[in-house]
Structure formats: C-alpha cells, structure tokens
Image (cartoon, coloured by chain):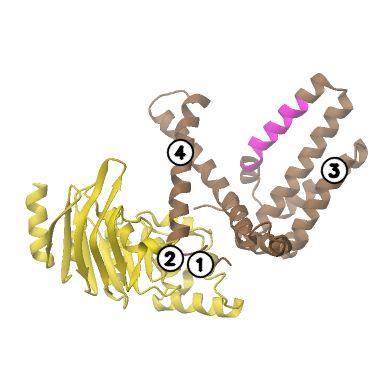
Chain colours: A yellow, B brown
Amino acid sequence: MNIRFESAGASFGARVAVEPLTLSLTENRLGVIGLNGSGKTTFARMVNGLMKPTTGKVIVNGRDTRDEKTALAEVGFIFQSPQNQIILPIVRDDIAFGLNGRGLTKAEIEKKVELVLARFNAEELAPRRAHELSGGELQIAALCSVLATGPDILILDEPTNQLDLRNRALVQKTIDGLEENVVVITHDLELISGFERVLLFHEGKLAADAPAAEAIAHYRELAA
Amino acid sequence: MQSLYLEGNSALHRLSPRAKIFSLFLLGLVLFISNNIPLLAVVMLLTVLAYRSVGMPKKESAARLKPILLTIAFVALVTFIVNPWHQALATLLRLTALMLFAAAVTATTTIAQFMDEITTLVRPLERIGWVKATDVGLAVGLVLRFVPEIIARYHAISEAHAARGLKVRPTTILTPLIILTLRDADNVAAAIDARGIRRHVS
C-alpha cells in the first residue's frame, strides 16, 4: 500500500479531530491505537475518503481522496459494528449486493460470492441470516462482503470489540491470514503486537509512530 | 439485522417476485375502486388464507400484525363516527385485506428480490431521465431492512424503561427511538458509501 498524508488534518467545526500530519505508510500491516476520542477512527476514515481532510491532502495509491465523490474503491472498510455494515439480511445476498452494478453477470457474481466465502472456509454462512450469526461469524461475513469487491487495502475498526475469546481468536487468525494490506484500529493490543508499524494517537495528535512494542509501551504510559 | 422474510416453500414463496408485486398493485386498485361489502369481505377472507399459507407461527403473525391492525381499527372507528356504518366496514375490510396480502408478499420475498424487481420495473423511468433505477431499488430495500430494526429498537427501549421501573410513554420512547434510528441510518449510509455500492451507478 502507499498512503501519504501531506499536512492532512480533520476538524468538525471548531473541534480538531486530527491535527495536520505528514506521513508515508507503505507497510503491509499497520496498527492504530489510542484512547477513546483520540482521532483513530477519523484518521481511518480519511484514508478511505469517507472523511475528506479539512487541511492538506491524503493520497492513497496515487489518488487524492478529495477528488473522489465517494470512498476509494481500493480501500475496504470494516466498521466497529459489522451489523451496520451488512445491508441485506442473508449473507449471500449481502455479499452479492456490493457486486451489483459492476458489469458482472449473475453467474459471475455468484461465483465471486462462492470464492470469497471459500477463502475463509465460510461457505456454510451463505444462506444464513446475519442476525443469527455469532460475533466472529458476523465479522467474517462483513469481511467477505468487503473483500468480494477486491480492495487493495483493508481497514478494520476495532474488529475484536465485544467478542468472546473464541471469536476473537477466529478474527485474529483471519486477519493474520489476509493477503491484502491491513490497517487495524484497536484497543486490543495483542491483536497488533506483531505489527511492524503502529501509530499512537492522543488528543488528535500523533503521539508515536514506531514498531508495535515501542508504541504499545508509550500507550500504556499515556493511559496510566 | 432481522428480516421480515420467512424461509419456506409455500405457493407464495414459489411465485415470482414480479407476479407478487403486480398482484399487490392490482389488489390495491380493486380494493379502492370497489365499495361492495360482500366482495370486499370475500377478498379479505382470501387474503387471510394467503397469509396463513406462508406458514408463519401464530405468535409471530400476531406480533407482526398487531400494530397495523390496531391502526386500522382506529381508522375504521373514526370513519364509523363521521360516516355511515357501511363505509366504516368497507374501510376496515379494504385496509385489512391490503395489509394481509402485503404482509404475505413481504414474508415470502427477500429484500434482494424486491430490490431486483423494483429496479427492473423502474428502469424505463431511468431511460427518460427521471430517476436512477438502482437508487429506487436501494431505497425500497432499505425501508424493508429498517422496519424490523425499528421494531426491535422499540422493544429494547421499552425493556430499558421497564428495567428502570419507568412507565412506557410515547414521549419518552419516541425521542431515543428517533435518535437511534437516525444514527443507524447514518452508519448504514456510511457503509453503503464505503462499500462503493452507489459508486458504479451509471
């Protein structure tokens, strides 16, 4: 991945959510940590273009997010609550839904749905209803719905939030096995402990940009 | 997220979504053109049979229909007060029949099927530049998606009232219900945007 923040910052009215920062992110795995309200999610939304920078610019794989009408196609986003991400109640329909309008035939869409579910050995989720899935299964369904469209970068916003140990392990294993570039925003420090680069946000500022162990140690000091 | 769709293999499940939507449209026309009480009564009985045929458990049927049945009863009562009795009865039969058939169609058609059909039906209007067919399909799909969500949210807020020993009042329920529903709508809109669902709309 190639993400560049060029003096890019974001404000909501008078409140500064992310102070202008200049960064180049090329690692395959990137962690983003910080206390609640520190600017992590706003930072992530700036990467996929859901939030346009109010100062500076963000360039993702050579494209300026300010020039895009909608979020960038190459950046998939898994939200904090996957149930909000899933638009249609049946998993198969929901994954197919994101593929409509892309010039694919019904057969091609069905094939893509099968393939993405097979990638996670989750074929049995296809006919199931989203509200009947466990937290981990719901995350996998949300992941499939996003990955079916073939993004280069995947952003996961607190993917292990409210999961029990079994589902958490399932999500961790899934993230570890992803071929795509991954940005994980999390309070679950174990999840990003092996990442080569972790950004620590504090009160809208970048407080640390370091390998996981160093950034986590700094975070513990801030949180104490 | 819950769904109004009920898994099954009834005749209505097997009928094409297009036929069901057209039948609903035609039924609506017939019901509102006619004031013939025996005819309306027969149609209503047929819609009762249609609704029963989808195989929904009685308890769930009652839970789904109760709010709208109460509304229809209220409308019929007001009509009875201000109009002759036969007009009130016609209103009651007409609205009940329409509600039952619409509920049967909704229970036997998935949201994806609804969206596909609505998009196809609206496509001619897109050609003359009036609407974007996929947007209309999406809008209808989202309405169907949100109905059970709002009902579930209402029950959750009612339970929260009960847990705190508070009496459930419309004034104290509506505000959180509206705020939470709008927040959900915002989240879903962001998800639609993030998934690029409208990006490829031509």
User: Which residue is the site of mark 2?
Assistant: A141
Q: Nearer the viewer, mark 4 or mark 2?
A: 2
Which residue is at 93% across, 37% downward? Answer: B36
Q: Tell me the amino acid under the disc marked 1.
A: Gly
Q: Nearer the viewer, mark 1 or mark 2?
A: 1
User: Which residue is the site of mark 4?
Assistant: B156
The chain under label 2 reads A
The chain under label 4 reads B
Marks 1 and 3, Cα distance to the nearest angstrom? Answer: 38 Å
The chain under label 3 reads B
User: Which residue is the site of mark 1?
Assistant: A98
Q: Magenta stretch containing residue A173, yes or no?
A: no
Q: Magenta stretch containing residue B66, yes or no?
A: yes
Residue toward you, A92 or A65? A65
User: Which percent across, then down, holds residue B125?
Assistant: 72, 60
**Residues shaded magenta:** B64-77
Considering the numbered disc 1 on the image, is that residue within a helix, a strand or a loop?
A: loop
Q: Tell me the amino acid under the disc marked 2.
A: Ala
Q: Nearer the viewer, mark 4 or mark 1?
A: 1
Marks 1 and 2, Cα distance to the nearest angstrom? Answer: 12 Å
Marks 3 and 4, Cα distance to the nearest angstrom? Answer: 36 Å
Which residue is at 30% across, 59% downward? Answer: A44
Q: Residues within 10 Å of mark 2 (few under 14, many from 20)?
A: many
